[in-house]
Amino acid sequence: MDPMDIVGKSKEDASLPKATMTKIIKEMLPADVRVARDAQDLLIECCVEFINLISSESNEVCNKEDKRTIAPEHVLKALQVLGFGEYVEEVYAAYEQHKYETMQDSQRSVKMNSGAEMTEEEAAAEQQRMFAEARARMNGGVSIPQPDQEQQVDDNTQQSNLQS
């Protein structure tokens, strides 16, 4: 019998990405400290269980307010109810930082997409240029021209210059 089946979990249960969790664990510890694989797995299981606990309590808080969508304030209230009140301020600060960064990212994408759109020919030329750069990096900095690449890029550049 699989040990995961003993505690009522199946292999399809939600988990967290091991590589990401391992990176987070290692970043929190001094460089000379090693963590056994069993300890890493245990930490990951604890994180999953903590998320389940917070989600469940957040849902209860949400239901008590006759809401159907869990909002950040429900999560903060759940932390209070579960005895993690000392972390509410830090969690709220992380949430505000996330909102700020998300807003910055969306503003950048709007700026990139508005007013500076390329023609199809310019996009094709840019794509060919990026392919050439990638090939050069793959070949150790040596640019190996692909058949018709130079002619196609030159034709597209000339067409763009004529249109301008």
Image: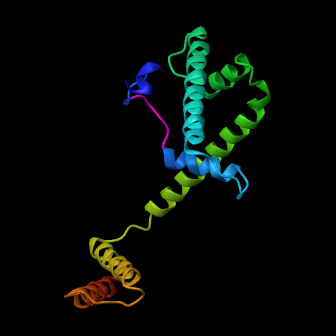
Task: Please state the horizontal and vertical placement of residue 137, each as a whole percent of the image.
Answer: 41, 81
Dominant secondary structure of the magenta stretch? loop
Q: Residue furthest front?
A: 1
Residue 12 image point, x, y percent = 37, 30
Q: Residue at x 55, y 32 (%)?
A: 45
Q: Is residue 135 above or below residue 108?
A: below
Is residue 15 on the magenta stretch?
A: yes
* Residue closest to the eye, 34 or 54: 34
User: In the figure, is residue 114 to the left or right of 145?
Assistant: right
Magenta residues (range):
13-17
Q: Is residue 96 above or below residue 136?
A: above
Q: Left or right: where does residue 8 sit relative to residue 41?
A: left
Q: At x 38% / y 30%, what residue is drawn?
A: 11
Q: What residue lies at 68% left-to-right and 25% top-to-bottom?
A: 76
* Figure quadrant of residue 158: bottom left
Q: Is residue 109 visible?
A: yes
